[in-house]
Amino acid sequence: MNKDQNRLVENDLQYLQLLSKTFPTVAAASTEIINLEAILNLPKGTEHFLADIHGAYESFQHVLKNASGNIKRKVNDIFGNQIRDCELRDLCTLIYYPEQKLEMVKAAEEDLNDWYHITIHQLVKVCREVSSKYTRSKVRKSLPKDFSYIIQELLQERPEDLDKAGYVNAVIDSMIETDRADDFIITISNVIQRLAIDQLHILGDIYDRGPGAHRILDMLENYHSWDIQWGNHDVLWMGACAGNDACICNVVRICLRYANMTTLEDGYGINLVPLATFALETYGDDPCAEFIPKTSGGTGFIDEKTRRLGAMMHKAISVIQFKVEAEVFKKYPQWKMKDRMLFNNVDYEKGICVIGGKEYEMKSCNFPTIDPKNPNKLTKEEKELMEKLHHSFVVSEKLHKHIDLLLGHGCMYNITNNNLLYHASVPLNDDGTLKEVELYGGKKYKGKELMHQTGLLIRSAFQSDSLPEEKEYARDYFLYLWCGPDSTLFDKSKMATFERYFLKDESTHKEHKGNYFKLRDNEEVCDRILDAFGVKQPNRHIINGHVPVHAASGENPIKANGKLMVIDGGFSQAYHKETGIAGYTLVYHSRGFVLVQHEPFTNEEDAVMRGTDIKSSTQIVEMSTYRMLVADTDKGDELRGQITYLKKLLYAYRHGLVKEYR
């Protein structure tokens, strides 16, 4: 017996005893080692990276359904020379939207039985292709119970196996005769979608602008494997859910700005009637010209009466927001944001605002709820309104459920397969070194530790065992994360919301980006960040979003000689005119990185009726010299660790240190 090996095994004896409950015999442990060794040699699973979805539910759903065009490419590879383009398009549409497409086919198809036979064979071929990089066990686990056995049988079918052709046709005939063919087609189409994406990474900002954030989170609740690195808009909604009144005001204001009441009212049951009543009573004679809602977020046409009411509500909540924010900035002088208490700087008789010693003309100066002597004090009516809004947010069961989902699947950053993921930035000094930022208790952190401690602080706002002082600070800190100059989720000189609404001089509207955005094209700076986060491998990258890529004007999302990739191309319709595109998906498969640039998606009905798809163009970012295997990934490291302990268990069994359970 090897004494060193014996000692190593004895050190882990307690864990090995526990492991033996799962693998009670030499045979069971040996079988699992063989299984794990085999998995290490499978191709790496496909990862998809998306950022800044901003409530664009239909576009997001379609990108997942078509796997950023990957399913269409596989269908073309399999059938490209065998069937017509229109048939290829119909097959893809069937995979994306099986229920809707089946209704159309059944209404138009003359020989439905023949169509079922041809189509099911085609779907099985596609399913076999997308499942080829997984173990049978993993494929089996992804199959719904009703059709698990049948799909497994059909996946083993081979065209050259003439002896089994009759069996396969009999299976399909039986499904048709028992009226189960439709259900089977729906099931296998969903399985194809499921297997086409192994892991989904969302780099922040599910919320705001578009009307479907709550629907996106409903969808993600049942999605097989995903993670999120929180964005500034996600954190804003977290703050609102935690009871931060400044965040509540910002959330309502942004929804009104983009005429998007769907998420608030239909999604989370937030009662906006008190706000509408207050706005009508207070601003009924005010044109509120600066507050006319934008419809570029995807809301579509709104009538003049709704537009007018929206503008009044928009102004009402904005004025309250600036007052509430001012009190928080006053409470935390260490944030150095007292200069954002701009109602203090307004001369209400002259209609000017003084900033940095310079006078700026106001667009309008109608503030019936402001006392010039105490401009940040809420009126009795405003206070009562905020109490009602606060109550609506903190008791919304659906909102709390979705925030819990973000907390359960998310964090400030993630390191996966040598890629560092975060939403916006890592604060930097002028010389590109990591900048220290103060958090709770006056402690300062930078880089990885700053991200980690910020994540812990966010969670403490929702934990019942947090100290009262820490919980209060954490709740208030959501506002700093939203608009603080050194926030990892903002990193700009200011959020110029007040200036854009009220000041005529557009030079005041400028928000100067922090050093990260000025230096992120510098390879040395990116290497410094990667080093600080412990990402050591040669082919390492930073992947983030937050700032739209102006593709129409030639901006390249690949920066720092390939070390950094920015994938916020603007999923939200509000960005399309600015960016010229409708978002990016970064795809990391076994051959390397591919960046997929999407054009705007029309809608689901158009996709089903006309077979339209998101038009996408691909850019090869980085190709591997060999096909990457599971062994080359973080999962491979995990499996090798399991194999090590299983081999120790075998040793323990064979040398009598642990008894087999026969």
Image (cartoon, rainbow, N blue to C red):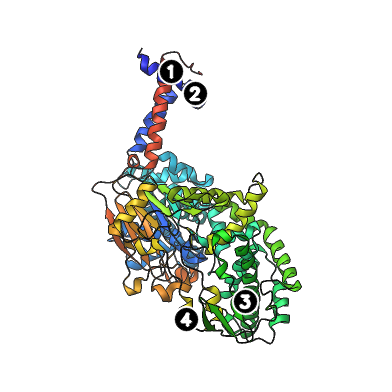
Q: Does 277 sit left or right of 268 as displayed?
A: right
Disc with the residue nearer the chain's start (1 vs 4): 4
- Mark 4 or 3, nearer chain start: 3
The answer to whether one can see residue 101 in this image is yes
Q: Which residue is mark 4?
A: 506
Q: Which residue is mark 1?
A: 652
Determine the image quadrant of residue 64.
bottom left
State the separation of the CA atoms marked 4 and 3: 21 Å
Can residue 567 be seen by looking at this rendering?
A: no
Amino acid at dot 2: Ser
Q: Which residue does the image show at 40% across and 40% down from the upper left?
A: 635
Residue 643 as seen in the image, left or right of residue 454 = left
Give the distance between the C-alpha atoms of the residues marked 2 and 3, in whole angstroms. 63 Å
Disc 3 target residue:
314
Quadrant of the drawing holding the N terminus: top left
Q: CB of mark 2 within 8 Å of CB of mark 1?
A: yes
In the image, what residue type sits under mark 3?
Answer: His
Residue beneath disc 2: 20
- Which one is in front in this view, the residue at disc 2 or the one at disc 4? 4
- Quarter of image, res 614: bottom left
Q: CA distance from mark 2 to mark 4?
A: 70 Å
Q: Is residue 56 left or right of residue 544?
A: right
**Residue mark closest to the camera, 4 vs 3:** 4
Determine whether the residue tagged by mark 2 lies in a helix, strand or loop. helix
Label 1 neighbour load within 10 Å: few <14, some 14-19, many 20+: many
Q: Are circles 2 and 3 on residues that touch, CB within 8 Å?
A: no
